Amino acid sequence: MKIATAFSVLDDTEKACCEVIEQLTQDASCPPNFIVCYYSAKHQYLQIANKLQFAFLSIPIIACSSCQGVMTADGFHSESGAGLTLWAIWDDYGHYGTGLECIDNITDDASVYQACQSALQQALAGAGRLGELPELIWLHASPGFETQMIAALEEMVGDQVPIAGGSAADQYILGDWSLFNQTAVTTQGVAVAALFPGGEIGYSFHSGYVASRALGTVTASHHRTIEMIDHRPAAEVYLEAIDEPTSDFSYPHSILEKGAFHPIGRIAGQLDQFPIFKLAHPSAVDSNAGLELFADVQCGELLYLMEGSRQSLIHRGGRVTQLSLTDPFSHQEPIGALVIYCAGCMLAVHDDVDAVVASIRRSLGEKLPFAGAFTFGEQGHFMTGKNGHGNLMCSAVVFYQRELL
């Protein structure tokens, strides 16, 4: 088994593709078994898809746009917002497949369920393992209905198969995200990979924030907007809690940066009597003093105000990847990793993003290859044993060398 990565910061999409393809194949005696591709939305995604589909005929690929750059063990890659990376695994004992579906009506639960389950069926068929439970489902989707997508996948495989990944992103939250695999492309849909690796995997999903106080209970909400908390306008409750003056506050109003350091938490379970939180990133106050988020919140949920510092966000990636190395099989040799880091956190600490990548590199080991994207929503498997979707989080999967008997 072997994992390798390649990257380019060339602004020209065709030249960037040629560079990463050459890097990935120059020392390889045979094609890889599975490829993951991340690219900043500044690139022409159709051109990337065409180049990779032609260069790696019949090899399963899953690809997702990233916010303003990508990362590998060599650093944060973004030249004027352009970055492209490939991650590949050579695994003679593993089986990999991908599936992709467009979703015409993303607001219709039935359409979302059908698309997700069809994509997973494609992935399982591509891996040659129909009817079996994968070791991991790697998920990328256009933002908006990831909670329903996880539920759709769990309807097929149960809730004990780990689901990890991240939601497609663009440069400035304008909807310019995209996805593709080895056969199709979409700007609104879902892409999944079914992984049956020849070795073990370790995974972790964490926020790195701490709860400071209870905010109250959601008494009115609509999809990704909290309208009322304890029967008060949600924005008023939130802004008071973060000591933000409301007297001169104009509605609607963006609070994206403030929300990155003060997200909303909900208890996702407990571990050793300590609560595990999943986060929602407040993005804006609407004209009715509602609180817009990047995740679903339901009426009746108890909300907590979470806090994070600049330093905690910088070092959080390293802590999460370190947790992926502490599984029961951690005595085995790790060979590489995939890392998802929230775009909101990256933008909040943008001047120190190189330190974020350095923290991940130190935790994995200076020579261990990894690749990652900056996403508009993160999916992962909590330490409580449940899959979930959250914001301002980090998800990591570490691959281990197959043990020879």
Image: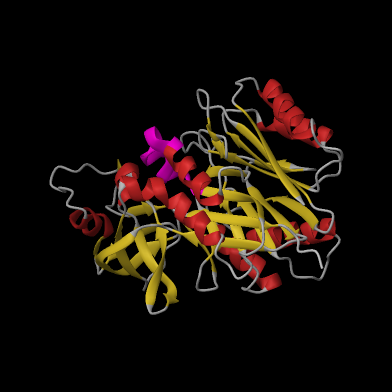
Residue that extends furthest to the bottom in the rendered view of this protein:
273
Residue 355 found in image quarter = top left
Decide which of 383, 52 is in the foreground and name it: 383
User: Which residue range is magenta in the image?
Assistant: 341-354
Does 342 lie within the magenta span? yes
- x and y, in percent, of residue 85 in the image: 64, 35
Asked if 78 appears above or below 166 in the picture, the reply is above
Asked if 347 appears above or below 202 in the picture, the reply is above
Total residue callouts: 0
Residue 284 visible in the snapshot = no
- x and y, in percent, of residue 33 in the image: 81, 48
Residue 166 visible in the snapshot = yes
Residue 147 found in image quarter = bottom right
- Characterize the magenta stretch by its predominant secondary structure: helix
- x and y, in percent, of residue 54 in the image: 83, 33
Residue appearing at x 87%, y 40% in the figure: 30
Locate residue 386 relative to residue 183 in the image: left or right: left
- x and y, in percent, of residue 163 in the image: 62, 62
Q: Quadrant of the C terminus?
A: bottom right
Residue 29 found in image quarter = top right
Locate residue 224 relative to residue 259 in the image: left or right: right
Locate residue 88 relative to residue 309 in the image: left or right: right
Does 337 lie within the magenta span? no
